[in-house]
Amino acid sequence: MAIDDERNRVLASLRDQAEGANSAALAERLGLVREVVERHLLYCADYGLVTWKRARNGLGTAVITERGQDYLVRQGR
């Protein structure tokens, strides 16, 4: 599914950035619309896959959690 693939791409990008990233930077890096990235971050935060200090301007930092890293391993990423 495209949505799951996008979500996994967002998580993998966060995994590769130990210091975390904001939604605007992730959107640019992945070639996605910022609102799409934020929707995936919101979903992932709800399930404990990331921590995200959301800000309206997209500058809130998101960081992958250990649970999120385990999720990517189970997804074969």
Image (cartoon, rainbow, N blue to C red):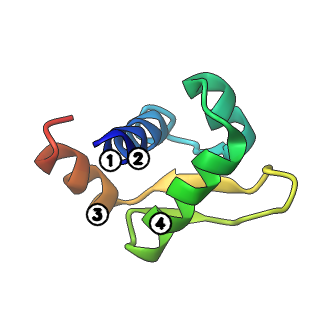
Give the label on residue 15, or none: none
Marks 1 and 3 sit apart, C-alpha to C-alpha, by 16 Å
Q: Is there CB contact under 8 Å for labels 2 and 1?
A: yes
Q: Residue at x 28, y 63 (%)?
A: 67
Mark 2 crowd level (few <14, some 14–19, many ≥20, 10 Å Cα): some
Q: Residue at x 46, y 34 (%)?
A: 13
Mark 1 sits on what residue?
Answer: 4
Q: Nearer the viewer, residue 65 or 28?
A: 28
The amino acid type found where label 1 is placed reads Asp
Mark 4 sits on what residue?
Answer: 43
Marks 2 and 1 sit apart, C-alpha to C-alpha, by 5 Å
The amino acid type found where label 3 is placed reads Arg
Q: Residue at x 85, y 61 (%)?
A: 56
Marks 2 and 4 sit apart, C-alpha to C-alpha, by 9 Å
Which one is in front in this view, the residue at disc 1 or the one at disc 3? 1
The amino acid type found where label 2 is placed reads Arg
Element class at badge 2: helix
Mark 3 sits on what residue?
Answer: 67
Mark 1 or mark 4, which has the lower sequence index?
1
Element class at badge 1: helix
| Residue 57 place in picture, x, y as percent | 87, 53
